[in-house]
Amino acid sequence: MTFKGAQCEASGGAGCACTLSMGTGSKLNVNCSKLFPKCFLMKKESYPGKGGRRIKPEGALVDNDGLYNPDCENDGNFKAKQCNETEICWCVNSAGVRRTEKGDKQTKTCSELVRTYWVIVQMKRANTDTVSDEDLKAALTKLITERYQLPAAFIQNIEFEGPYIYIDLKQNSTQKVPGAVDIADVGYYMEKDIKGDSLMSPDKKFEIPINGKNFLVQEPLIMYIDEKPHELSMKRLTAGVIAVIVVVVVAIVAGIVVLVITRRKRGRYEKAEMKEMNEMQKELNS
């Protein structure tokens, strides 16, 4: 398996040795037979200054901070505490996504690297080709197991809702054994592939072949769910989400005001009507 930016040579037998060149002139030794860890890839990408383009979907934890220069363990795992070479630090999950508020480097502590056990890959159909759900599920399963080498056991579900496709990848702490492909890495590679910024070499094109045609997808969105609740406050809400909340609150308040005014008017009308009936009764009796 070859990857963009990596130099690989045969090391005898069926194996090979690869080095990933970093922007600082340093090199990392990586396993060429599996996906390169996301932490190493982000570190390499951070040097040219490429910006992240992730968006925050409502109700899910995503990487709002974009691309940063991470601190990685020797095996490619993210270190629980990240600072991006600054005096401000935060804690991340195993996908490298911030899960706490930021704090001072001297006082911010991260006791553990919390496992991301569920990755949701959302994408949208890019064409109007009609394919059966069964054929599309089979093609996506083959793509994930062959291109990204993730065992099918970790593909929990693939479902469709209108033009949208949702792939649930689940892999808890006990299932993630050393050397196994990580679902967070798969999500990162898929996001890059769908955006047309593939991390693999040009000869390994991203395609979803169905009935002899390439099924096209677009607008990837990767969502992360951790084994422990994140510690982000309401300040993390995007302007769009806040605007929706404000609109809903205003609508509720307006509804209450209209209801109160309507009841008051009805009360005054009923009182006036009763008064007129009493006066008419008095005239009839006189």
Image: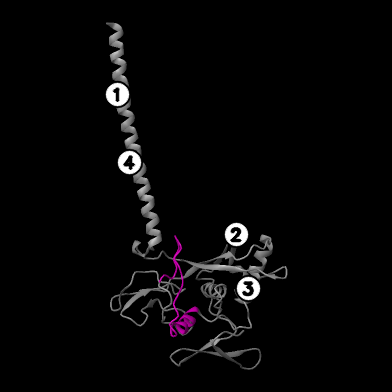
Query: Could you say whether the residue bearing mark 2 is in a helix, strand or loop?
Result: strand
Instruction: From the image, tell me which residue sits under label 4.
Output: 257
Separation (CA) of disc 1 from disc 4: 21 Å
Q: Label 2 amino acid?
A: Phe
Measured as percent of width and height from the top left, residue 20 is found at: 51, 88
Q: Label 1 amino acid?
A: Lys
Residue nearest the viewer, comparing 209 with 231: 209
**Tags 1 and 4 touching, CB below 8 Å:** no
On screen, 33 above or below 167? below
Q: Label 4 amino acid?
A: Val
Given this view, does label 2 or label 1 mark the residue nearer the observer? 1
Residue nearest the viewer, comparing 208 with 281: 281
The numbered mark, 3 or 2, whose residue comes first in the sequence reads 3
Q: Label 3 amino acid?
A: Thr
The magenta stretch is 38-64
Circle 3 residues within 10 Å: few <14, some 14–19, many ≥20:
some
Query: Could you say whether the residue bearing mark 3 is in a helix, strand or loop?
Result: helix
- As drawn, the label of residue 160 is 2
**Tags 1 and 3 touching, CB below 8 Å:** no
Instruction: From the image, tell me which residue sits under label 1.
Output: 271
Measured as percent of width and height from the top left, residue 17 is found at: 58, 91
Is the image coloured rainbow, by chain, by secondary structure, or in one colour? Answer: one colour
Q: Which residue is at a point 45% across and 80% down the rendered structure image?
A: 50
Separation (CA) of disc 4 from disc 3: 57 Å
Separation (CA) of disc 4 from disc 2: 41 Å
Say if the magenta span includes residue 173.
no
Instruction: From the image, tell me which residue sits under label 3.
Output: 145
Separation (CA) of disc 1 from disc 3: 75 Å
Given this view, does label 4 or label 2 mark the residue nearer the observer? 4
